[in-house]
Amino acid sequence: MTTRRGPLARITAVIERIPRGRVATYGEIAALAGYPRAPRLVVYALKQCGPKVPWHRVIGRLNARHARVSIREPRSAALQRRLLTKEGVRFDPEGRVLLERYGWLGEVSETTSASSRTSPGRGRRRS
């Protein structure tokens, strides 16, 4: 039996920790997995994950207060919304989720996640 390794395994492991009735954004998942500047890597991982991974709990951030289903394909977007609603996540009339109520920040403090976003030299090319 092979063990999952690498970025996809780390991302999947974080997604599997999101509790029922909670959501996390692509950026939050990436940061918790150790890739704070790679939310698109989360999208790729979700496309590769198996059916037991709660993919529907990962949504797109709109602003500091709200997130939304960001899948563009209508059937999949409707399925994600239906699965979240079944778990108790409520959407406002504009289709937004209040992160203060339904957001899950994982097991990381605000100071840790903030410092990982602002590490000196990250993402900059050195001459």
Image (spheres, rainbow, N blue to C red):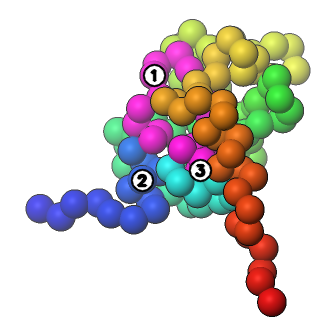
Q: Quadrant of residue 89?
A: top right
Mark 2 lies on residue = 10
Residue 110 visible, this orientation? yes
Numbered marks: total: 3
Q: Residues within 10 Å of mark 3 (few under 14, many from 20)?
A: many
Identified by mark 1, the residue type is Pro
Q: Which residues are magenta?
A: 14-32
Pick the front one: 34 or 52: 34
Residue type at tag 2:
Arg
Q: Nearer the viewer, residue 51 or 124?
A: 124
- In terms of sequence position, does the residue under pointer 2 or pointer 1 come before the other? 2
**Label 3 vs 1, first from the N-terminus:** 1
Q: Position of residue 58 (x, y in %)?
A: 59, 37
Residue at 83% across / 29% down in the picture? 64
Whether 21 is among the magenta residues is: yes
Above or below, comparing residue 75 to residue 21 in the picture: below
- Assess whether residue 77 is covered by the magenta stretch: no
The residue carrying mark 1 is 19
Q: Earlier in the sequence, mark 3 or mark 2?
A: 2
Q: From mark 2 to mark 1, how far is it between C-alphas?
A: 17 Å
The residue where tag 3 is placed is: 30
What percent of the width, then of the height, locates residue 43? 61, 54
